[in-house]
Amino acid sequence: MGAKLNILYIGNIKNYFSQAEDYNCSIVTLKNSLEATRYLETNKNIDGIICDYYLPGNTGFFLYKWLRAQSEYDSTPFIILCKEFNAEIYKSAFKKHIDDFYVPSVTQSKDVLSRLTYLCANKKPEPPQKASKIVESANYKMPLSKRLFDIFVASSVLLLASPFLLLIILAIRLESKGKVYYISKRVGRKTFDFYKLRSMRTGSDELLKKLAAEKNQYKKEEVKTENSSLDIPCPKCSKLPEGETCSPIMYIDTHQICDYWFNVQKREASKNDSTFVKIVDDPRITKVGKFIRNTSIDELPQLINVLKGDMSIVGNRPLPVYEAEVLTGDDLSKRFLAPPGITGLWQVELRGKGGKMSEEERMRLDNEYAEQFEGDNYSFWYDIKLILRTVPALFQSDTV
């Protein structure tokens, strides 16, 4: 048996954790968040926290926010107890990344303690020396040949294209009101301001959510089922004696589902959501906008990003924040090993051919290009080949 866990409980359910000794836990009970914050400021050896949602003067969410702002407690397991199930509170807890949610009136305290014991064993912060190594290895240096080439090409093209750019800017201004350029936050190896010539009517971002549901090129077919996934029994629990479960029970509306099976169902549901958003025949695009998109002239201001060091000529396309924030898996986030670029492998492979691109294909091509940045495998001539193959892809008939 390992060392005894020090658990802090904030609430007023008397004798609820009388079985703490059975789980090798020592419980400290406090009545409100003020007592809790004072206690935590002087006692740094707390392994996990259980907190009632309803506290005098505020809620458990208040304490959770304070806790996560403290570096020493930023990964301490935190469980919320709510005296009765409330769907809105449950959803809020999930969105805030609270570790778990229980209703003590229907859930035995042993389930809560069992869950907290598991979280304490599997959610420990890494030692400082190990973390520093990770940060060190994550530091990225642009290959010198690539950076010099970027500066030379970007400055040369901007100088030669400046007279033509002035004409395009005038045409954009005459056709529709608003700024002639468009700035959005993009994510490459960092978050930066991404520049483009405006090809859409002003206020277009408000229509994106509706259009994404109707015309997203990467949208997957919805899987329709007659029964709710919450009604499907857990295969692991089915093999156990009646009354036993493979993991702690969760209560969602009128359903009971074990923690393991809930997370399996959640992963399956997420597979039907598209990561990338690209609108086919986008109705928000102006006439001038259609021309500069088909000829890729709208991309020219990104040469300023290249000069600033935000981007490279060749790389993986920088993603809008709402796309990048869902790329959490190792197989998805691998693309960020490469610098963001104006053109890249997936553009020359499929965009110039007028073929449709699935989300899986794009991920594969992004990862393929990024692999050369995992070690000392960068090839300057590979970039040159991609640039040469980009020329036929500059002129296209669609507006995606």
Image: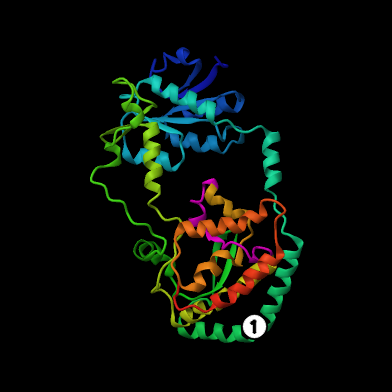
Q: Which residue is mark 1?
A: 161
Q: Position of residue 55 (x, y in %)?
A: 41, 30
Foreground pick, 235 / 21? 235
Left or right: residue 133 compared with residue 296:
right
Q: Is residue 334 magenta?
A: no
Foreground pick, 89 / 283? 283
Q: Position of residue 153 (x, y in %)?
A: 70, 74
Q: Give the number of callouts.
A: 1
- Residue at image position (48%, 29%) is 33
Label 1 sits on a secondary structure element that is: helix
The magenta region covers: 309-330
Q: Is residue 177 at least partly visible in the picture? A: no
Point out the image quarter for the C terminus.
bottom left
**Residue 178 against residue 112 in the figure, above or below:** below
Could you say which quadrant of the image residue 20 lies in?
Answer: top left
- Residue at image position (67%, 47%) is 138
Q: Position of residue 52 (x, y in %)?
A: 41, 28
Q: Is residue 150 at least partly visible in the picture? A: yes
Q: Is residue 323 magenta?
A: yes
Foreground pick, 200 / 347? 347
Point out the image quarter for the N terminus.
top right
Q: Disc 1 marks which amino acid?
A: Ala
Task: Rate crowding at label 1 as few (under 14), some (14 to 19) or many (20 or more) other CA atoms within 10 Å.
Answer: few
Residue sticking out furthest to the left = 226
Q: Position of residue 119 (x, y in %)?
A: 50, 28
Foreground pick, 144 / 34? 144
**Residue 375 against residue 106 in the figure, above or below:** below
